[in-house]
Image (cartoon, rainbow, N blue to C red):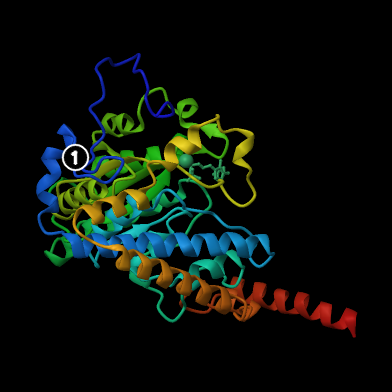
Amino acid sequence: MSTHSMIDPLHGGADPEPIRFLDDDGAYAPSATAAAFADELANVGVDDFSQWYRDMVGTRAFDTECTHLQRQGQLALWVPSVGQEGCQVGLVRATEPQDHVFPAYREHLVANVRGVDRLAIAAQFRGMTHGGWDITDPANGNVHLYTLVLGSQTQHATGHALGQVLDAKRRAGDTALDAGEAGIETGEATMVFYGDGTSSQGDPNEAMVFAASYQTPEVFVVQNNGWAISVPVTRQSRTPLYRRALGFGIRAVQIDGNDPLAAYAVGRRYLRLAREGAGPGYIEALTYRIGAHTTADDPTRYRPDGELEAWQLRDPIRRLEGHLRSLGVDDAFFAEVAETADREAKVVRDQILTLPAPDPDSMFAHVYAEPHPRIDEQRAWFARYESSFEESTA
Ligand SMILES: Cc1ncc(C[n+]2csc(CCOP(=O)(O)OP(=O)(O)O)c2C)c(N)n1
Ligand SMILES: [Mg+2]
């Protein structure tokens, strides 16, 4: 697509074809670049692909429901992920339970597959939590918080991955504070998600410096969906984004981000290398934001004619459906998945409207493990402030 094909005026040399296993209709047609990753697909088959399809359709129904809820005034804002389910499902299904995930704000499928309840995701956008996912299970599949502060999660992730190295050293009896040389096998990795526009921020670039220096067990995932709100990716970078990572000394590839198999294969390889102590990796997933940036955005004001329609033909759900059909999966399965997804989305709708507002005082409860005078002071101030409303209406 025009938004992604870039001439490289500085370094010369054509970019290799993005890694893909499926063509636009879902037929198995690996690119030449996919061969090096094909063995990562050896243990997945039709049952896995069926589950991935279920994840994608379920997320899309949830996404659509949340957009409606926002339009009806029930959510403050919604950030749709429509169109990006393909790379998300492949990447999250490549993780292992002990891995940690740092999302941005559009990774609904990733969060849900790792164990965050969809209702908890919607609750954030209704202002029904003070942060965190589900207080009854703070670990939530090792999915860290959504962040709207672009790129900050990359530094959290690199810091976390550095901690994974230090933990592994401690387990081996080495108490040095320096992560030091490469080659520490951690057995667990960190995957961090961000967008094409975010790659222009300082934070991810700094995060990559430290990741490369200390060979953190980390996988950077950039979902290049063509746009940073109304700014096209071609304005953000004169070279394909994956090349920036190469400049930091981080292995990097570009994948067809609407091909779940490509995302799975590359994700699995890079996560394993990270866990084994072979350092960080970077995956640029070429995808497209089919929806608006958020419910506060109107993309018809800036998208070139025909761009959306061209990408709709490459919809990752349609594509995986094509692949499943080529493997013999029939109509009954697709009908059942659609019905289940609708039913689950309605459950979220019914439940979100009944969620109680959190106790305002609870925002002070989890700041520190031990009591802290500054927090006590703020808590007391807030209690007085709250009660001032009661007095004025009495
Ligand atoms: C530090 C910071 N600067 C600016 C913004 C405003 N902002 C929110 S989303 C966005 C665009 C992000 O684009 P991209 O990284 O491509 O992610 P996408 O939304 O396309 O997934 C901007 C500029 C912000 N949230 N945080
Ligand atoms: Mg973007």
Q: Amino acid at mark 1?
A: Ala
Q: Is residue 284 left or right of residue 82?
A: left
Q: Position of residue 210 (x, y in %)?
A: 31, 43
One can see residue 191 in this view: yes
- Residue 133 visible (yes or no): no
Q: Residue at the spot x=36%, y=18% of the render?
A: 7
How crowded pointer 1 is (Cα within 10 Å; few <14, some 14-19, many 20+) is rated as: few
Q: Is residue 40 left or right of residue 319?
A: left
Instruction: Tell me which residue sits at (68%, 64%) in the image.
Output: 72
Residue 170 in the image, given as x and y percentages of width and height: 18, 64
Mark 1 close to ligand 2, CB under 8 Å: no
Q: Position of residue 93 (x, y in %)?
A: 26, 60
Q: Residue tagged by mark 1?
A: 29
Q: Residue furthest bottom?
A: 394
Residue 252 vertical placement versus 168 (above, below): above
Which residue is found at the position 44% from the left and 81% from the top?
136
Kind of element beneath mark 1: loop
Coordinates of residue 251 in the picture (x, y in percent): 21, 37
Q: Nearer the viewer, residue 192 or 323?
A: 323
Q: Identify the residue at image location x=17%, y=59%.
A: 186
